[in-house]
Structure formats: structure tokens, C-alpha cells
């Protein structure tokens, strides 16, 4: 029964070559993009997770504008890391 399904699928692929190529190409690009997004997200979520007390690390982000000047900075004090290592 399954063998018959494969025969029909192969016949349809050869019968409609352009349509099959578009579908297979789209599926492969979609799977590749999904894998790349998954790898990026896992890398971003694993940032600073090698510390024993990684849940105690904090980062302060500042976004401000003074007149026409825009300020975007992040801070992570040395005191935070000192406390992390000592405690």
C-alpha cells in the first residue's frame, strides 16, 4: 500500500516538474530558515549561562534623547561580577 503511494508521488513529481521544484525548493528554504532561527535563539538564550550564579547577572540598558542627540548605552558594573564571584 505504501509502495503504491510512493509510485504515485514520483509520477506526479515527474509530471509536474516546475510545480514540484517550486514546492521542494520552498520547503527546503523554510526548513533551513527555521534551523538557523533556532540556532540563533539558543545561542542568545545561552549567553552568560556558564556562570554558577548566572541568574544574578543584571544588565542595565539606557535609551535617552537630549535635544537631537540620542543615547543608547548598556551598563554592567564590575561590582555585579565581584558580588557574583564572592557570594
Image (cartoon, grey):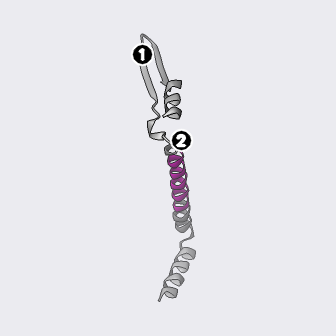
Magenta highlight on residue 4: no
Residue segment shown in magenta: 27-43
| Disc 1 residue crowd, few under 14, some 14–19, many 20+, Cα 10 Å | few
Which numbered disc, 1 or 2, marks the residue closer to the eye?
Answer: 2
First in sequence, mark 1 or 2: give its number: 2
Q: Residue at coordinates 47% horizontally, 18% vertically from top-left? A: 71
Q: Label for residue 65?
A: 1
Q: Residue at coordinates 51% horizontally, 78% vertically from top-left? A: 9
Q: Is residue 13 above or below residue 36?
A: below
Q: Residue at coordinates 50% horizontally, 87% vertically from top-left? A: 4
Return the residue nearer the eye: 60 or 14: 60
Residue 21 x, y percent position in the rendering: 56, 65
Q: Are marks 1 and 2 in contact (CB under 8 Å)?
A: no
Between the C-alphas of marks 1 and 2, the distance is: 35 Å
Find disc 2 in the rendering and name its residue: 51
Q: Is residue 87 above or below residue 4?
A: above
Residue 79 x, y percent position in the rendering: 50, 25
Q: Is residue 8 above or below residue 72?
A: below
Residue 72 x, y percent position in the rendering: 48, 22
| Disc 2 residue crowd, few under 14, some 14–19, many 20+, Cα 10 Å | few
Answer yes or no: is residue 25 visible. Answer: yes
Answer yes or no: is residue 77 visible. Answer: no
Amino acid at each position: 500500500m505504501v509502495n503504491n503511494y510512493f509510485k504515485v508521488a514520483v509520477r506526479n513529481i515527474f509530471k509536474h516538474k516546475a510545480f514540484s521544484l517550486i514546492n521542494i525548493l520552498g520547503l527546503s528554504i523554510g526548513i533551513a530558515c527555521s534551523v538557523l532561527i533556532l540556532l540563533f535563539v539558543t545561542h542568545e538564550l545561552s549567553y552568560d549561562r556558564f556562570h554558577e550564579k548566572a541568574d544574578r547577572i543584571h544588565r542595565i540598558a539606557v535609551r535617552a534623547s537630549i535635544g537631537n542627540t540620542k543615547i543608547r548605552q548598556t551598563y554592567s558594573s564590575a561590582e555585579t561580577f565581584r558580588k557574583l564571584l564572592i557570594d
